[in-house]
Image (cartoon, coloured by chain):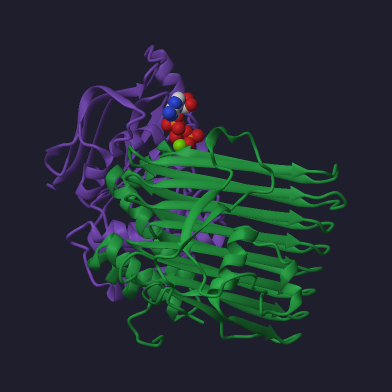
Chain colours: A green, B purple
């Protein structure tokens, strides 16, 4: 459960978001370091979750993951029974005002369907750290939808580590919205272990001011005929820093596996730092891996089309920013994530536009409070 | 006499290294429906884009006057706000922007259309119904993965929302199945009826004109407007093609 952390006793996490393949360090993007509060409990702390979660690899790395386990003080385990459809999303509520650090394990049994939401929101009293570790095991033919909304602000640093194991025929759909936070690390690793397991992952982000966003996307494709499709797009404004590591690991034996990743970045600030490390590891002949990236601005064709409808270049950038929030609200499956996106929208887009987003997308009817 | 909405006077334009349009004169009366026909590659789409202010073309001479003001040097976003709309032959995909966000933005920036989000949703819902377009499209990214026909319907949706003074429809009918064609034709008819809009219809197909009262027909060949007539000219072209006009232009020595 949520626990207020002692802010002064600091611990250093030196290697957060380490990608599977280390490269020559020219961009210095092999990892990121975090200063975090020392856990209240000293020494080795074992996860209180069932043992099977120990084997789940998370994108933020073992150092950060074990810190979260020990700092969280408690853990939450949810099991979704075989063949059932759990309508109500499993919500991991991360509140910056409470300094939430939490450890969650979700077991989605054979053929079951579930939605997991991780919503980080709020403002810390002063500067503060929040963290969420979420490990998900999807058994055969299970269907997991994960929606992450990180909607933090000034003074917030946040670590979000996700690990997903997908057995034969399991489907994993991920939507990540990184909408703000002074220093944010999001690391997700999906292990497509079983035959025909598949992942679709769609990330949108907006980083502005001096915000720092650090992302590690890893897919391990072990099973035959597994499929992954990772789409990432975002806007960097002002002096925002973004580091994106994208790894598709096509492991020996994964015959017929396909992995695809595409990244687009809209750079809308002169002092933006934009680093990307795309990697396709391939230890199997009979696979297809594909990486596409486009960095820069909105294409001339798109700008011309928008201009023909009255949208100037400056308006277009505002439209793209608004669109990220609209999209988050459209896909947020419940109130905590939706409200997180909306209150962040208020700060970023202003009250008028934020209200427009809320009203336009049917949130003023009061059904979701 | 009817007011003139658009006057194109002695306009020549092209890309940096290639002249495309030559000495174009065209006048559209307010509330009128004009048709522009011509063989592939004649310059019809180029004319549409030049009227809209597409920066990839340069105007080398002549002027465009719209609603009493010279707009030759205006950027396209300003022309759009002034009331000109160009429906694309091939609408552009814009990933990352839900159709809803786009529509809302282009309406809110026009004082005459500004309204509450709720009323806007209602209006969009009505038009979607009219166009037999599921409103689930609103939550999808603008034109991304839409079929050819769906893209054309989204152009119509914008036409009906924005109610521009002048609508240039560039082959809005191409690639539509029979049902979609009649839905789109009814949409155009509705636009005409709603706001007494002025139309410049670029087409190769006479079916889309069946529901419209055509005031004037223009023929473009190799960047020249070579003939003008009433609605009957459409039927004539449909029956015997463009060769007559091409021969006439060649005889005059007007080869680009
Ligand atoms: N941006 C451009 N760059 C280079 N050439 C161009 C450009 N735009 C148009 N053209 C050329 O100008 C000519 C006229 O093209 P345009 O698209 O206007 O023809 P059109 O009459 O609309 O033909 P269609 O009936 O096939 O749509 C063509 O030869 C075309 O290749
Ligand atoms: Mg054309």
Residue B207 seen in the current view: no
Q: In front here: B94 or B29?
A: B94
Residue that appears at 13% across and 46% down: B3
Residue B36 higher or lower than A11, as above or below: above
Q: In front here: B46 or B58?
A: B58
Q: In front here: A338 or B130?
A: A338
Tag count in the figure? 0
Q: Quadrant of ligand 1?
A: top left
Identify the image quadrant of the C terminus of chain B: top left
Quadrant in which residue B108 is drawn: bottom left
Residue that appears at 72% across and 81% down: A112
Left or right of residue A312: residue A122: right
Q: In front here: A48 or B154?
A: A48
Residue A176 rendering spot, x and y as whole percentages: 52, 62
Residue B144 seen in the current view: yes
Left or right of residue A136: residue A333: left
Residue that appears at 52% across and 67% down: A148
Residue B51 rendering spot, x and y as whole percentages: 29, 37
Left or right of residue B187: residue A356: left
Residue B133 rendering spot, x and y as whole percentages: 48, 67
Residue A181 rendering spot, x and y as whole percentages: 39, 60
Residue B245 higher or lower than A284, as above or below: above
Q: Residue furthest top?
A: B253
Left or right of residue A25: residue B37: left
Quadrant in which residue A325 is drawn: bottom left
């Amino acid at each position: 459960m949520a626990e207020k952390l002692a802010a002064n006793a600091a611990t250093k996490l030196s290697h957060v978001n380490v990608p599977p393949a280390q490269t020559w360090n020219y961009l210095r993007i092999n990892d990121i370091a975090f200063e975090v509060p020392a856990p209240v409990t000293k020494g080795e702390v074992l996860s209180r979750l069932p043992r099977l979660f120990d084997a789940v690899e998370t994108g933020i790395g073992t150092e950060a993951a074990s810190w979260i386990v020990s700092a969280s003080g408690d853990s939450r385990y949810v099991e979704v029974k075989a063949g059932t459809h759990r309508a109500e999303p499993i919500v991991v509520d991360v509140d910056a005002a409470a300094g939430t650090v939490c450890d969650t394990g979700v077991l989605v049994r054979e053929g079951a369907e579930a939605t997991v939401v991780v919503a980080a929101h709020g403002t810390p009293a002063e500067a503060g750290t929040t963290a969420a570790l979420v490990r998900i095991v999807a058994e055969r033919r299970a269907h997991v939808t994960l929606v992450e909304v990180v909607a933090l602000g000034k003074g917030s640093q946040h670590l979000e580590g996700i690990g997903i194991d997908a057995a034969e025929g399991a489907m994993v759909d991920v939507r990540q919205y990184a909408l703000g936070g002074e220093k944010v690390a999001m690391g997700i690793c999906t292990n497509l272990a079983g035959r025909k397991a598949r992942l679709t992952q769609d990330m949108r982000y907006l980083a502005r001011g001096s915000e720092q966003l650090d992302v590690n996307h890893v897919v391990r494709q072990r099973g035959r005929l597994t499929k992954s499709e990772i789409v990432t797009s975002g806007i960097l404004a002002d002096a925002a820093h973004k580091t994106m590591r994208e790894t598709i690991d096509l492991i020996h034996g994964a015959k017929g596996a396909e992995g695809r990743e595409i990244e687009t970045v809209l750079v809308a600030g002169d002092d933006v730092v934009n680093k990307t490390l795309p990697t396709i590891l391939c230890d199997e002949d009979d696979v297809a891996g594909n990486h596409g990236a486009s960095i820069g601005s909105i294409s001339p064709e798109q700008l011309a089309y928008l201009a023909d409808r009255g949208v100037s270049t400056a308006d277009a950038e505002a439209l793209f920013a608004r669109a990220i929030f609209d999209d988050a609200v459209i896909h947020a499956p419940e109130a905590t994530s939706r409200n997180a996106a909306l209150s962040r929208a208020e700060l970023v887009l202003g009250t008028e536009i934020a209200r427009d987003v809320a009203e336009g997308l049917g949130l003023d009817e009061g059904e979701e409070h | 006499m009817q007011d003139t909405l658009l006057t194109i006077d002695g306009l020549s334009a092209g890309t940096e290294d290639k002249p495309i349009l030559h000495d174009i004169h065209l006048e559209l009366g307010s509330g009128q429906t004009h048709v522009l026909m011509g063989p592939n590659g004649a310059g019809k789409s180029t004319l549409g884009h030049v009227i809209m202010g597409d920066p990839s073309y340069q105007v080398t001479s002549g002027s465009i006057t719209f609603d009493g003001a010279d707009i030759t040097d205006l950027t396209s976003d300003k022309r759009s706000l002034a009331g000109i709309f160009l429906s694309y032959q091939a609408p552009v995909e814009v990933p990352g922007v839900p159709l809803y966000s786009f529509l809302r933005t282009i309406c809110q920036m026009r004082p005459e259309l500004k309204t509450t989000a709720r009323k806007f949703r209602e209006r969009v819902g009505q038009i979607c119904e009219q166009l037999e377009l599921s409103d689930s499209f609103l939550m999808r990214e603008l034109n991304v993965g839409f079929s050819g026909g769906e893209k054309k319907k989204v152009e119509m949706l914008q036409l009906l929302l924005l109610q521009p003074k002048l609508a240039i429809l560039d082959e809005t009918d191409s690639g539509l199945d029979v049902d979609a064609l009649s839905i789109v034709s009814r949409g155009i008819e509705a636009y005409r009826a709603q706001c007494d809009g002025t139309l410049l219809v670029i087409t190769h197909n006479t079916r889309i004109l069946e529901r419209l009262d055509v005031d004037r027909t223009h023929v473009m060949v190799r960047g020249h407007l070579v003939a003008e007539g009433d609605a009957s000219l459409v039927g004539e072209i449909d029956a015997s093609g463009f060769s007559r006009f091409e021969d006439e232009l060649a005889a005059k020595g007007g080869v680009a």
